[in-house]
Image (cartoon, rainbow, N blue to C red):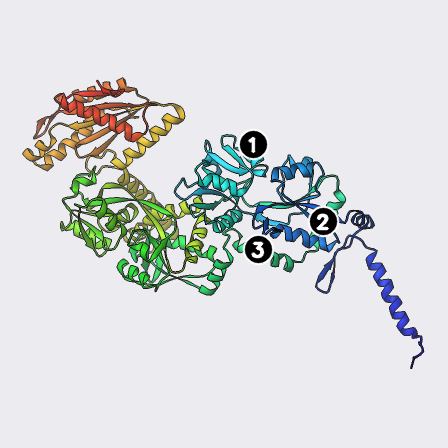
Amino acid sequence: MKVPYQFDGHQFLLCLLSLILTLLVSSNPGVAQQTGERLVVELTPAEQAYIQANPVIRVHGESDWPPYNFVKNGNPTGFSNEYIKMIAEKVGLEVELVVGPTWSECMTMLAQKEIDVVTNMVITPDRHKFALYSEQYVFDLVNSLLTRKDGEDYTEIKQLKGKKLAIVRGFFFEEILTKYYPEINLLLTNNTLDAMKQVEAGRADAALESHATFNYYIERYFLTELISRPLINHPHLSNVPQYLGIRNDRPILKSILDKAMAAVSEEDYANLLRRWYLAADTASFNFTRTELEYLQDKGEIKMCVDPNWMPLDAIIDGQHTGMSADFMQLLIDRIGIPITLLKTQTWVESIEQFKQRQCDILSLAVATPDRLEYANFTRPHLELPLVIATREREPFIPDIRDVLNHKIGMVKSYAFVEILRNQYPDMQIVEVASIEDGLQQVEHGHLFGYVDVLPTTSYTIQKRFPSLKIAGRFDKILPLSIAVRNDEPELLAIFEKAIASIDEKARQGIINNWISVRYEQGVDYRAIGRFVFIGLGVLAIVLYRQYLLQTYNRKLEKISVTDPLTGCFNRLKIEKCLQEQESLFHRNGQKFSVILCDIDYFKKINDTFGHLPGDAVLIEMVALFHQRLRKTDILGRWGGEEFIIISPQTDLWGAKALAEALRQDLASHKFPTVGYQTASFGVAEFHSGNYSISHLISQVDEALYKAKERGRNCAIAYQQRQVM
């Protein structure tokens, strides 16, 4: 049965009131309102009319800029494409993605009004001529330099002066680099993958692009020979903000898009970031979905260390300490899960625990064929020279091959034991339990020398073995990496990315902190306990402590560069001075020469009179030379009875005249006990024909050899492949 309609006055009034409120609210244009969980964009009548007349916006779509804007399986996708569609939907616009033009062509199309919007724009002065910019919509992108793993380790743009850098044609990099770095040779490519291929093939020294984009392609195309290192704190290229670029004759479209962007909720934006693995806490390192899931499942990473290898690595009072511990703290901040210490008593025990998978990583290790059976290794983050320590009375060792017939101690299971055995099969290597054990055996005369890396050896000698010294160094540089278990391959990629994100300034700060400061602190605390009287005021303690620090600084500096017998510079200092003079030559054209001096028949002196009179000859000869040399001349002990003189701003014949004067001074001087002595001198000048300092040393050595051939007690100059 049909029920007749009945008028309800109360209901009518409620409906009328609701309609009036709706009209009042909608009359306030330009406001994004919250309705439930959805933000509604309020547009002006002019903006609504524009949308009705122009319902479709043409947006440039990249074909190959993942994960932001690219084509996958024939469909445009990526963070930026999803974002522009999200905001267009909020104001009733449709998006037509124009895929195909290169980035350079895209800029031309925007300038000529052939497209309406370009995503991922960076503000530059030139682009202001044809584009309007929205509010920033992407967190700052992390840009990085791509290089070959076996090539130069470029971490700063300024290192590429005179080098070839691959970039995509039309990217804002081109404008910035042309303006601020005209010395860099730019190789312009059509896309990012092409730029990466140029680096892989060696046609470019590096490429510049988004860190996330580089790593996407490295993973997708298995470009394992390449590595991406983020740029840190660069004023123009680090952490670059991204905007929508809008044709400059459509300010009303900019207004509409700005309102649509304001209507995107924080939750929707965060979900979009997570979907493309661009959340702020992982964006810089570009961990993949698989790597993030691995870290979540792993929960913690167990670490083994060398418990007795200060200042690099140690366990003291149950805590991991040393340079490696500071590096690990930086890595924990990047990886996001704890790295926990598995305590061991010796390095051998740490290796065994690692092989049994009780720990996941070794904090500092060197790759060897044996270890590659159970471990992967990151790129080295420390490279240190090997040195040999001996008793103070032993002469300096210019060539390690001179002591192969002596017993040399090395810690058992250290990588360089295997390396040096392969390089020097005749070396008499004695494996010891620890560095203290090895140095103690040297001190007691059971071993001739002990081999380890420079910082550790120097640190331990200064603390516990003052009767020992560093007597020589190997040509071999020890590359120290993080070793990771090879049954969990995700771990290697995670640590590679985390290490790559550590900028050079932070890395060098850690090294300087442990090598130059921590030593001093240890000595300073003992000195305070020894010298400061109980009851002195805080001010007196501070002043005395500063005095001790300064005094010890001076002593350390002098010890590190001085030959302990003669008081002149040691070989390490001389090598540094030669490098400095080479730099001055290349930068300012400042010439310099070197003189190599060898005491004639010095072995006969030791055999006839003993080592003490022989040492006295060396000491007195250095004093004699100092009387003749200028303040700018640099005298050092090159090894044994050989001495070297660097003469800045001196040509070949000026240096030969100096050598002849020194020869005459020496020949006319009578030494106590041994009488008159002579020496032979070789002279060479560094000039543009020299390829390196090594080439210069070969020349002066050849001149010295010729002086000995001519009967000794003479000075010979090397000139253009001849000695005269």
Front position among marks 2 and 1 = 2
Distance between the alpha carbons at the discs numbered 2 and 1:
32 Å
Q: Residues within 10 Å of mark 1 (few under 14, many from 20)?
A: few
Query: In this view, which residue lies farthest toward the bottom?
Result: 1
| Neighbourhood count class around disc 2 (C-alpha, 10 Å): few under 14, some 14–19, many 20 upward | many
* Residue type, mark 1 in image: Lys
Q: Is residue 234 left or right of residue 433?
A: right
In screen coordinates, is 696 left or right of 242? Answer: left
- Residue visible at 46% across and 57% down? 335
Q: Which mark is residue 112?
A: none
Marked residue nearer the N-terminal end (2 or 1): 1
Q: Nearer the viewer, residue 76 or 580?
A: 76
Residue that numbered label 1 is attached to: 179
Label 1 or label 3, whichever comes before in sequence order = 1
Front: mark 1 or 3: 3
- Count of residue discs: 3
- SS at mark 3 in the image: loop
Labels 1 and 3 touching (C-beta < 8 A):
no
| Residue 710 image offset from top left, x and y in percent | 14, 20
- On the image, which quarter does residue 712 sit in? top left
558 in relation to 667, above or below: below
Q: Quadrant of the N terminus?
A: bottom right
Q: Residues within 10 Å of mark 3 (few under 14, many from 20)?
A: some
The residue that mark 3 highlights is: 276
Residue beneath disc 2: 257
